[in-house]
Each structure stands twice: as structure tokens, then as C-alpha cells.
Image (cartoon, grey):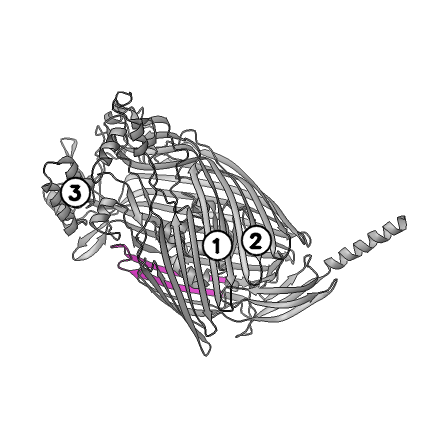
């Protein structure tokens, strides 16, 4: 018996050793040039096993591979996917060299990248920046539809914003320290070099960092791994820009072991879909790599994409009814040309150095250094310029906004109900003009200057000049055929300089730098160290402070792969420091604004795990769960960093708990994935700025609104089905059902500058505690919470194709005002409940607005030609073919902050302070012509 057991043990051991010695090796070549293709994804269909080709186009499966008849699937963006059948015998080496991939002349994946990243991701009123970098062609049908069809409707994956996902370039995280979100325009217009992307969705493990609950996207721009060849592109559109040209050339890895890539581009337009939304952007990219040996390579990348564009305004329904959904209040005619007062300008070049070290075939260590600097500016008009008369500031102008509430018909209907002629005249004036009057501001300034006075009006810019250094190292080790270890450390240092900057004094030469709303001349000083200062074009004024932020984080994870079960375990830790340094001594906060404030420190950690069970090659089950504890962003840490050191009361780290589970079906003709998810965020903060009427009774005051300790709940399901019904026709169906709500009643604080009005309204040292705001179970305003799509695609063997998708959106909600849901709503100036307060009417007044459901139809198509060694491609898309008019978002104004104010306003035929909305675009087009060689 013992001999039999020994024999059995030896036999099983031999079988195990033999199985471990079973290898698959091969290579992939370009069918046209016969050159090796790098970064081709090589999969064993029906398994969870995949590898990528190296710089020589080689790949090897040295893990536990299944025996018998198998199918190798080759896929890469820009090439036709191919499958090769093989037979794997126990203990043998399977070689399949010189497999070929044909360039896909009808591929539109890259064109989707062009359309989305250049257009939607640069639009402040778009929801596309919440797609968490979903630009990779390898996405499943649900992710592709969410990125390419749903984005224009403010749709957010699982209701979460892009802070919950990481976007990396060559292993360097690009998310901003201020708000945690990527600044997409930092790499806009260089789409040809952004196609090599490695994406992990949700909590799934990434090879580059711990990631967030929406996953990680790493964009690989190493010169040796960009597809060799060149291309010239021209595009035309009526969305953001009207014209674009782009040229790119990549050498591939040369015989001398050098590689380089260059890309140049320009996008421009006098006006996009919204009125006066000018656009101007230049793009420069270069990447140079030297392969020092088989183990070492160095790559340096430079990206510079300066861009400037005009913004568009949210408006009340009254304004849209008088004008249309293209209306934009921010512009006016000057010398016969449209001039937008709200311009966003970004100039932030980035340089990245990468050292890639392959210690051996199973171990690698990549060290990366990035340096980014530059500026981000947002311009706006100031109309509070004054002169000192006997030591007292006098003057100031009227609000130049053409949609200011005191210029609209509803204001006159409310204030002069017995003389509707005033409202009629206001209507006619707004219809005829309704734009900023630049000449009026110039004339006022010039006339005042002739009397020895200062500017009344001026154009200035809120500037942020960031300098950031990032250093990290990423380690990968294949322990054996089944176990892989991945770990990394990351250090980031940020110096953020913040100030207001005079751009144009509109005919005047000086501006008095004081706060005209203060009670005393001392309190009015923006900088007590330079009282009554006169500033000129190019000077800093209003506020000036620095934020230093340093963070260190590390993570480690183990990935375990077996024939039927894969699982992973991952953990992280992070430490973050913030400190404000005031360079102005603010008159409203003389003892709490200048110099260095308190140094803040936050320690966070995270853990996640997941398991994949491969029941058969067709049926796969997956589950992930995770917990993340993270520092608040700079944006949500300081209550009003422009004026003082104050931080959010009781601030602490945020917590995220998340779980998701999926069923995946894969067959030669049908692919489907059904996912359910639940995410909970606790201890979050939010800060808003607005002018409120009815704070503490009948007072009106400009406030900073602080929501502290917010809990949010997100749960729902995602379904994506794709069917190749014939060799030329593909059908798709997608559904996203979610419910995203506030899950508690967070604390509410208002802060403002100390003044007599503030003290009368109950503020103590500029702060008023409203205890809590009753937000629980209100829906979050984060785009449509339900979205559906049905579509088809026809691809002709003659290299032309056409597709159509019908999208349907429901459950989009208005952003509610927390102040209206606090004790302030029913409290009179004496602290007692309003004597005419009606509980039932109050519930009606505070009911959250749900927008109308809507349907959007999109069409796409294209054709390609091979002309000798060249490929000419034409792509066209028409979005919102039926010209559907729909709201994508909006918010309640904070001005009607108590019961009486809101009741009286809503009782009007047209509310004076109705919600402000964003509307989606009507019918738009995008046309792209591309020559590749």
C-alpha cells in the first residue's frame, strides 16, 4: 500500500512538472511591412490567460496552459483581430512564429478617441471627463457605449466622478491634487500617440498603482511601442472646434536601438455649438527612447498642449425661453467681433523620464520621474472698481451680465405688477440685445479716468500656477507560473500659486484693490500690508496665496492564476500633507490670513480582493470588494483659501466601501456581461460659493457653504450584450440602472467675511453653524441614473461601414440647495418658526425636480481606401440626429434660502430665481479625413 501511494505521488509530481514545462511561443508581424508588431494582446480564448508581444513581436505563455485544442486570439488597435487554432500536448513546446495581422482600414476605434477626447473632455459642461479615461479599444460593449454614446448627457459610470479613477501616462498619475481629477486638455490633440492603453475596470488590479473604485488607465507613449509610420489628419466639426489638423510620425525601434515619435496638431474655431465659444489649441509631443541593452532602456517624453477656449453659461428657463439653448450670457460685440469674458486658458507642459529595467524574463523594475509646471487661468469681469473720496471708497458699476435678474422681465413682473410695460420693455431689450455691452464699460472707465478716477470695470483672471514633481518605482515579479507580485511606491510634491491677475482695465490705467462690501476701510483691504494699492494690467490683486502639498503612497498586490480560478489581494497606504501660505494680509481676517497656516496631515489606507471563477470557457463569474480611506482634496479642505487659513470643521479622511459581481458569457457569436455593484462613500466634504437671500431672516449675504460628513450611496446594475449575427452585421444592447442618493443628513456651515450684516444674521467670527441639512434620500445630481442603448453596425467587405444607436435616458435630477433643507428654511430673523409656515406646502416647495426623459439617436459611418502603400480613411458622425432638446444638469439657486422667499418666488408666473440649467447639444457633426503611411 505504501509503495502504491509513493508511486501515485511520484506520478502526480511528474504530471505536474510536465504540465509546467508546457510552453507556447510565437511572434506577430505586420502583414504589409513584415515588421514585428509590439503590444499585441495574445489570448487563449476561453481562459483568463493573456500576454503581450515585446519589441521584437515575440510572446511566450510560460504559465499553466490548458491542454488539447486551443485558439489563440490576436488583437491590437488599428489591426483586424485574428484567431489561430493550435494543439497543446502535455510537456511539449508549441511554436507558432510569424503570425500576421492586417491593418484594419475600416477601424474606427482611433476615431472615437479623436472625437471624444478632443471635444467632450474639454467641455466644462460635459460629463465625459467622468468616463475615467475610457478611451481604449479593448473595452467591452458596455464601456464603449458609456464612453462614446452616453458621455454627452453627463452620464457617470456608476454615478461616480473621475476622481475615483486614475489616469496615468507612462506610469505617472496625472490626476490633479486640487480636485483629484485629470486635466484632459494637458494632452489634448495628440490622439495618434495615445492609442496604447492598458485599462482595468472597477476594483480590478492594475500593474501600475492601487487604483480607485472606477479603475486605472495607463497610456503608454514609449517611443518604441508606438506603431511605426506616419499620418496626417484633418477634421471638421461644429461641437467645440471647427477645424483640426494633426501630423504624427513614429520611427519604431531602429537598428541602432533608438526610437522616436513626433506629433503636432492645431485645433481652432471662432464658435462651437454654443454662442461665442471660441477655441484655440496647439499640440506638441515628442518621445525619444534608447534601448541600452536587453535589460535597460531610457525614454523621455515631452507634452505641451496650450489651449484657450470660451466658456458657456448655465441659464434659467426664462432666459432659454426668450433666447434658445445656444444662448451664452458671457459674450458681447466689440468692434464688430464676439468677445467672450469667460476664457479658460491652460498652459501646463509635462516632461516624463522612464527607466525600464528587465532584470530577467520574470522580473522588471520601472522607475519614472515627471515634472509639470505652468498655469491655468479662468477670466471674468469685475464691476466693483472704486475711488477713495475722503478716505471712503465710492463708485462701482452695475452688473454687466445681460442675464442679471434685475434686467429680466420676471423681475419687473414681480416688482411692478401694476405696470407690465416695464416687463415688456425688458423682454424686447433682452430679445434685441441680451449680450455684454463692452462699449458701455469702456466709456464708463474712460469718463472716470478723465476725472482722475480709477477703473470701474475690469477683466481679470483667477490664476493657478502649479509646479509638480512626481517620482515612482513599479516592481513586477512572476514568482512562478501561477503567482505574480506587483508593488510600487510613489512620491508627489506640489507647489500651487494662486492669485488674481489683471488682464484688461478696459480703457482705464489703474484699479483700486479693495473689497467694496466691507464695513470699514481696514476690513476692505485685500492686503493690509499694501493699503489702498493701485494696480495695473499684469499685476496681482484681490488674493494671493500658496498651497504646498506632499504625498507618499505605496501598494503591493499578489495575483494568483489557475486553470479555473483566479484571485488577487491588494493593499495600500498613503500619507498626505497640505499647508497654506498667505502672501496677502486680508483685512477681514488680519490675524488668520498672512504667513503659513497649520500644516495638515492625513493618513489613509486601502485593501481590495477579487476572485474569478471560470466555470467553462463560455461562463465566467467574477466578484470584487474593496475599502479605500483617502485624504480630502485641496478643494474640499480649505473653506475659503483666498482669504484665510480656515479649514473645514472636523475634517478627516474619506472612506469608500465597494463591491461588485459579474456574470460573463462568451461565445463565437454572442458576448454578454451582467454586473451588479454597491458603493458607499462616507465623511466626504463639499464647498460651494454663492449669494444667499434670507439667511437668518431677511438678510442677504455672500457665503461659502460647507457640507461636512457627507455620506453617499450608489447601487445598480450594468448589462452589455453584443451579437455578431452575420459576418457583416453586429447588434448591441446596453442598460445601466442606478440609484445614487445622499445617505445621511450632513453638517452644514456657512462662512463669510465678518461684518455688521453677518453678525446680525447670526454669524460669529464669520461662521454660522446650521447643524444639519436634511438631504438623506435626495438623489445626487450626477447625470442620468438610468441609460439604455440599442444599436447595430454593418461592415462591408469593401471597407465601408455604417452604424446607428438609439439612446434613452431617465432619472436625471436637479442639484438641490442644502441651505434650503436646513433650519434656516423655516426660521424667521428672531429665531422662531415663521408664523405662516405651512408644512405641506414646504414639502412641495422642496421636492426635487426630475428632468424629462429623452432619446438621442446617433449615426456613424466611414470608408477607407488603400492607395499603394497609403491608407486613406474617411469617418463621419452625426449626433442627436432628431435634434432632441433635453436638460443634462442644473442646480437650485441659493438666493431664495428661506420659506417665504422660495414660496413667493415659486408663486410667480416666472420665478425670478428659478433653477439654472445646462442643455445638451442639438444636432452636431464630426468629419475626419486621415492619411496613413
Give the CA separation, mark 3 to mark 1.
46 Å
Q: In the visual, does 746 lie left or right of 209?
A: left
| Closer to the camera in the image, 818 or 854 | 854
* Residue under numbered circle 2: 664
* Disc 1 secondary structure class: helix
Density class for disc 1 (Cα within 10 Å; few <14, some 14-19, many ≥20) is many
Residue 529's spot in the image, x, y percent? 28, 33
Give the CA separation, mark 3 to mark 2.
57 Å
Residue 753's spot in the image, x, y percent? 28, 30
* Residue under numbered circle 3: 409
| Closer to the camera in the image, 375 or 397 | 397
Q: In the visual, does 549 lie left or right of 698?
A: right
* Residue under numbered circle 1: 142
Q: Is residue 265 magenta?
A: yes
Q: Is residue 266 magenta?
A: yes
Q: Tell me if residue 427 comes above or below residue 395 in the rendering.
A: below
* Magenta part of the chain: 260-288
Q: In the visual, does 914 lie left or right of 161?
A: left
* Disc 3 secondary structure class: helix
Amino acid at each position: 500500500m505504501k509503495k502504491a501511494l509513493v508511486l501515485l505521488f511520484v506520478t502526480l509530481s511528474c504530471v505536474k512538472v510536465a504540465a509546467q514545462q508546457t510552453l507556447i511561443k510565437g511572434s506577430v508581424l505586420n502583414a504589409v511591412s513584415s515588421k514585428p508588431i509590439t503590444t499585441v494582446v495574445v489570448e487563449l480564448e476561453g481562459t483568463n490567460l493573456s500576454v503581450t508581444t515585446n519589441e521584437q513581436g515575440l510572446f511566450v505563455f510560460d504559465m499553466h496552459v490548458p491542454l488539447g485544442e486551443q485558439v489563440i486570439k490576436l488583437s491590437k488597435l488599428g489591426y483586424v483581430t485574428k484567431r489561430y487554432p493550435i494543439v497543446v500536448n502535455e510537456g511539449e513546446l508549441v511554436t507558432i512564429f510569424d503570425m500576421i495581422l492586417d491593418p484594419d482600414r475600416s477601424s474606427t476605434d482611433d476615431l472615437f478617441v479623436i472625437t471624444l477626447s478632443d471635444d467632450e473632455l474639454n467641455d466644462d459642461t460635459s460629463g465625459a471627463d467622468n468616463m475615467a479615461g475610457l478611451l481604449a479599444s479593448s473595452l467591452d460593449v458596455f464601456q464603449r457605449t458609456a464612453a462614446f454614446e452616453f458621455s454627452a448627457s453627463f452620464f457617470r459610470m456608476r454615478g461616480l466622478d473621475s476622481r475615483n479613477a486614475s489616469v496615468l501616462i507612462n506610469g505617472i498619475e496625472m490626476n490633479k491634487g486640487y480636485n483629484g481629477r485629470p486635466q484632459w486638455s494637458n494632452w489634448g490633440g495628440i490622439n495618434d500617440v495615445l492609442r496604447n492603453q492598458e485599462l482595468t475596470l472597477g476594483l480590478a488590479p492594475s500593474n501600475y498603482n492601487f487604483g480607485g473604485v472606477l479603475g486605472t488607465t495607463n497610456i503608454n507613449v514609449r517611443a518604441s511601442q508606438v506603431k511605426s509610420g506616419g499620418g496626417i489628419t484633418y477634421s471638421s466639426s461644429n461641437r467645440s472646434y471647427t477645424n483640426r489638423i494633426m501630423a504624427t510620425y513614429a520611427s519604431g525601434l531602429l537598428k541602432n536601438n533608438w526610437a522616436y515619435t513626433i506629433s503636432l496638431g492645431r485645433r481652432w474655431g471662432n464658435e462651437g455649438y454654443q454662442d461665442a465659444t471660441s477655441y484655440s489649441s496647439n499640440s506638441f509631443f515628442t518621445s525619444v527612447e534608447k534601448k541600452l541593452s536587453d535589460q535597460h532602456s531610457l525614454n523621455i517624453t515631452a507634452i505641451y498642449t496650450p489651449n484657450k477656449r470660451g466658456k458657456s453659461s448655465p441659464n434659467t428657463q426664462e432666459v432659454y425661453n426668450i433666447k434658445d439653448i445656444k444662448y451664452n450670457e458671457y459674450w458681447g460685440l466689440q468692434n464688430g467681433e464676439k468677445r467672450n469674458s469667460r476664457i479658460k486658458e491652460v498652459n501646463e507642459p509635462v516632461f516624463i523620464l522612464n527607466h525600464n529595467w528587465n532584470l530577467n524574463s520574470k522580473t522588471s523594475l520601472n522607475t519614472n520621474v515627471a515634472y509639470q509646471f505652468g498655469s491655468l487661468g479662468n477670466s471674468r469681469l469685475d464691476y466693483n472698481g472704486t475711488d477713495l473720496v475722503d478716505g471712503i471708497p465710492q463708485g462701482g458699476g452695475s452688473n454687466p451680465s445681460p442675464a442679471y435678474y434685475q434686467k429680466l422681465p420676471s423681475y419687473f413682473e414681480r416688482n411692478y405688477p401694476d405696470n407690465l410695460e416695464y416687463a415688456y420693455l425688458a423682454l424686447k431689450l433682452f430679445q434685441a440685445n441680451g449680450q455684454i455691452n463692452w462699449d458701455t464699460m469702456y466709456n464708463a472707465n474712460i469718463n472716470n479716468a478723465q476725472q482722475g478716477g480709477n477703473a470701474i470695470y475690469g477683466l481679470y483672471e483667477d490664476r493657478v500656477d502649479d509646479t509638480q514633481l512626481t517620482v515612482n518605482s513599479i516592481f513586477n515579479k512572476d514568482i512562478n507560473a501561477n503567482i505574480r507580485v506587483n508593488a510600487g511606491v510613489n512620491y508627489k510634491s506640489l507647489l500651487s500659486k494662486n492669485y488674481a491677475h489683471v488682464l484688461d482695465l478696459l480703457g482705464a490705467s489703474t484699479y483700486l484693490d479693495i473689497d467694496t462690501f466691507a464695513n470699514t476701510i481696514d476690513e476692505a483691504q485685500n492686503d493690509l500690508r499694501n493699503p489702498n494699492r493701485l494696480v495695473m494690467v499684469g499685476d496681482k490683486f484681490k488674493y494671493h496665496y500658496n498651497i504646498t502639498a506632499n504625498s507618499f503612497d505605496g501598494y503591493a498586490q499578489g495575483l494568483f492564476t489557475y486553470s479555473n480560478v483566479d484571485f488577487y489581494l491588494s493593499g495600500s497606504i498613503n500619507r498626505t500633507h497640505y499647508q497654506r501660505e498667505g502672501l496677502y494680509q486680508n483685512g477681514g481676517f488680519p490675524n488668520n490670513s498672512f504667513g503659513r497656516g497649520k500644516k495638515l496631515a492625513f493618513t489613509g489606507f486601502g485593501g481590495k480582493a477579487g476572485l474569478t471563477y471560470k466555470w467553462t470557457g463560455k461562463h465566467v463569474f467574477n466578484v470584487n470588494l474593496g475599502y479605500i480611506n483617502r485624504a480630502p482634496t485641496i478643494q474640499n479642505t480649505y473653506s475659503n483659501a483666498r482669504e484665510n487659513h480656515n479649514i473645514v470643521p472636523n475634517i478627516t479622511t474619506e472612506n469608500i466601501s465597494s463591491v461588485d459581481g459579474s456574470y460573463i458569457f462568451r461565445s463565437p457569436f454572442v458576448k454578454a456581461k451582467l454586473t451588479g455593484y454597491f458603493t458607499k462613500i462616507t465623511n466626504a466634504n463639499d464647498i460651494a460659493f454663492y449669494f444667499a437671500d434670507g439667511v437668518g431672516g431677511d438678510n442677504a449675504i455672500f457665503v461659502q457653504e460647507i457640507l461636512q460628513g457627507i455620506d453617499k450611496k450608489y447601487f445598480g446594475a450594468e448589462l452589455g450584450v453584443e451579437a455578431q449575427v452575420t459576418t457583416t452585421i453586429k447588434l448591441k444592447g446596453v442598460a445601466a440602472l442606478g440609484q445614487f442618493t445622499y445617505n445621511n443628513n450632513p453638517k452644514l456651515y456657512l462662512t463669510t467675511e465678518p461684518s455688521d450684516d453677518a453678525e446680525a444674521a447670526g454669524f460669529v467670527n464669520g461662521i454660522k453653524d446650521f447643524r444639519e441639512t436634511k438631504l438623506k434620500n435626495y438623489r445626487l445630481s450626477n447625470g442620468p441614473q438610468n441609460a439604455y442603448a440599442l444599436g447595430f453596425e454593418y461592415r462591408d467587405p469593401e471597407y465601408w461601414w455604417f452604424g446607428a444607436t438609439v439612446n434613452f435616458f431617465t432619472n436625471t435630477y436637479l442639484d438641490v440647495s442644502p441651505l434650503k433643507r436646513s433650519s434656516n428654511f423655516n426660521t424667521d430673523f428672531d429665531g422662531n418658526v415663521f408664523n405662516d409656515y405651512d408644512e405641506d406646502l414646504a414639502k412641495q416647495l422642496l421636492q426635487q425636480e426630475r428632468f424629462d426623459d429623452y432619446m438621442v439617436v446617433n449615426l456613424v459611418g466611414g470608408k477607407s481606401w488603400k492607395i499603394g502603400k497609403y491608407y486613406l480613411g474617411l469617418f463621419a458622425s452625426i449626433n442627436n440626429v432628431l435634434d432632441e432638446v433635453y436638460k443634462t444638469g442644473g442646480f437650485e439657486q441659493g438666493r431664495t434660502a428661506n420659506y417665504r422667499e422660495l414660496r413667493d418666488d415659486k408663486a410667480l408666473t416666472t420665478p425670478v430665481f428659478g433653477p439654472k440649467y445646462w442643455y445638451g447639444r442639438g444636432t452636431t457633426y464630426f468629419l475626419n479625413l486621415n492619411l496613413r503611411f
